[in-house]
Image: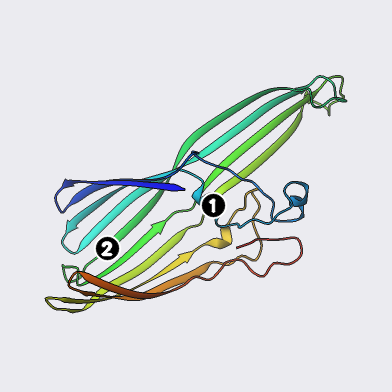
Amino acid sequence: QVLIVGMSVPLIKDTLAVAVTSAMTVGVLQTQRPFYVDEREQFFQNKLYFEFLGDRLEATTVAVAMTYRPMAHLSIGIGATMINRATSIPQIYIPDASNQENVETNPQIEVEPILTPHLGLVYRPLGDDEFEVSTSVHFPSQSTLAGRGYLRFWDFEYPDDQTELKQPFDLVFQDEPLRISLGFKANVLRTERLLWTVYGDALWARWAAYTDRHGGRPTNWTNTLSGSFGSRFAVGQNAFGLGLHYAPTPVPEQDGRTNYVD
């Protein structure tokens, strides 16, 4: 369950405004569920998971933005989304290597916010909302967890110049690619009671640079170009809309070791 709260405040009427919105998960601030997409998962849950969904709705995110309208036919927006980056350094001492259930642990965890920018622009060449063209850019973002474990045994011969066994790991969650969109909206017919509007958009996403939860870069993933087209009819206080959306997957057919469930 997700609770969405937002607010916008005009600073200068019809010229400058700021806004903030937050998608808050109910009951937990953020859940991080690592899993393998190949045969290594058999040693843990031995299941397949949806790669794109899941943790997208299991983390609280906050976005702030500002919009500026320097003239009647142009609006410019800039904002940022805040997600978390964490570092975990557990220090583990095992007094008796034959009894590894008896351990002494000192975990050190640091969590810091990171901001990912996004930009938008709306252009109205006629100076009103009869026809407008818009574009947006969302820069890539990740919520990462970097960890370094230091394992110590009693009476153990360590490698040269070491006093512990190092166990690094790097996990990646909520990976979102670079996305660039272009759209339009036009009022085809307007009368006192009737308004007929058509709209369309295209979205390019750089999925070829996707990073999975264990920091791996999938092979043969492709960038995608999705699109929408639709129409909306409004008669008085009533409205009816119909649209089509095309969204190809960046994931090729899976065989062999990889098992990306898209």
Alpha-carbon span between mark 2 and mark 1: 27 Å
Residue in the image at 67% along x and 28% along y: 90
Residue in the image at 69% along x and 55% along y: 37
Q: How many marks?
A: 2
Label 1, residues with CA under 10 Å away: few <14, some 14-19, many ≥20 = some
Element marked by disc 2: strand
Give the labeled residue for mark 1: 175
Can residue 64 be seen?
Answer: no
Nearer the observer, 128 or 3: 3
Q: Position of residue 237 (x, y in %)?
A: 19, 69
In the picture, measured across the screen, residue 135 lies left or right of residue 59, that is left
- Among the two numbered marks 2 and 1 on one chain, the one whose residue lies closer to the N terminus: 2
Nearer the observer, 78 or 7: 7
Q: Nearer the viewer, mark 2 or mark 1?
A: 1
Q: Position of residue 91 (x, y in %)?
A: 69, 25
Label 2, residues with CA under 10 Å away: few <14, some 14-19, many ≥20 = some
Residue in the image at 32% along x and 51% along y: 78
Q: Are marks 2 and 1 in contact (CB under 8 Å)?
A: no
In the picture, measured across the screen, residue 64 lies left or right of residue 69, that is right
Give the labeled residue for mark 2: 122
Toward the left, the furthest residue is: 192
| Quadrant in which residue 22 is drawn | top left
Which amino acid, by three-letter code, is at mark 1?
A: Asp
Q: Residue 219, labelled with which disc?
A: none
